Amino acid sequence: MIVNTLYDLLKERGIYLAVQGCEHINRALAVERTLAEQKDFEIVSVVPALHAGGSASVAAFQLFEDPVEIEHITAKAGLDIGDTAIGMHIKHVQIPLRPVKKTLGAAHVTALTSRPKLIGGPRAQYE
């Protein structure tokens, strides 16, 4: 239900959904093949299962039109449901968001967004 809702909300806005699996599939992400091909992501050979990938990954794989698994992505933002450690897939510099609702069922919810890096020294100007 969660994956379906997110998929529908994002799709109507022209945003692709990527769903990260657990460590048993190296935190690979289920995405649409069109996204993987457009962005030239390396497709990996794994199909998520309940005990190797997790329920959200399985739901995404069943819902997507032409699902594939990829190993890496650099997203602008993400929603972490169940503490699956999504930070590795979010652009640097990551900024935590504090959702009003901190749980979904029994799962802890956190969120990350990103901002451009501030580079330079004491004389650098940022805006």
Image (tube, helix red, strand yellow):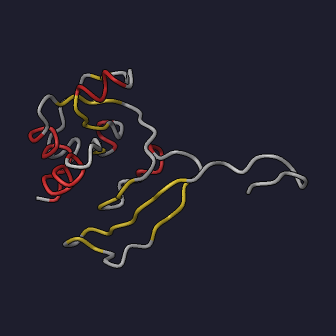
In the foreground, 112 or 52: 112
- Residue 88: percent from left, percent from top: 47, 45
For residue 32, above or below residue 84: above
- Residue toward you, 23 or 104: 104
Residue 81 lies in what quarter of the image? bottom left
> Where is residue 63 shown, x and y percent of the image?
10, 41
Q: Nearer the viewer, residue 41 or 71?
A: 41
Quadrant containing the C terminus in the rendered view = bottom right
At a point 55% along the width and 55% down the height, the residue shown is: 94
Tell me: residue 45, above or below residue 119: above
Residue ID at (29%, 36%): 25
- Which picture quadrant has residue 29? top left
In-image side of 120 versus 3 (left or right): right
What percent of the width, then of the height, locates residue 108?
A: 32, 69
**Residue visible at 26% across and 30% down?**
69
The N terminus: image quadrant: bottom left
Q: Residue furthest bottom?
A: 100
Compared with 96, 119 (above or below) is above
In depth, the one of 33 and 19 nearer the eye is: 33
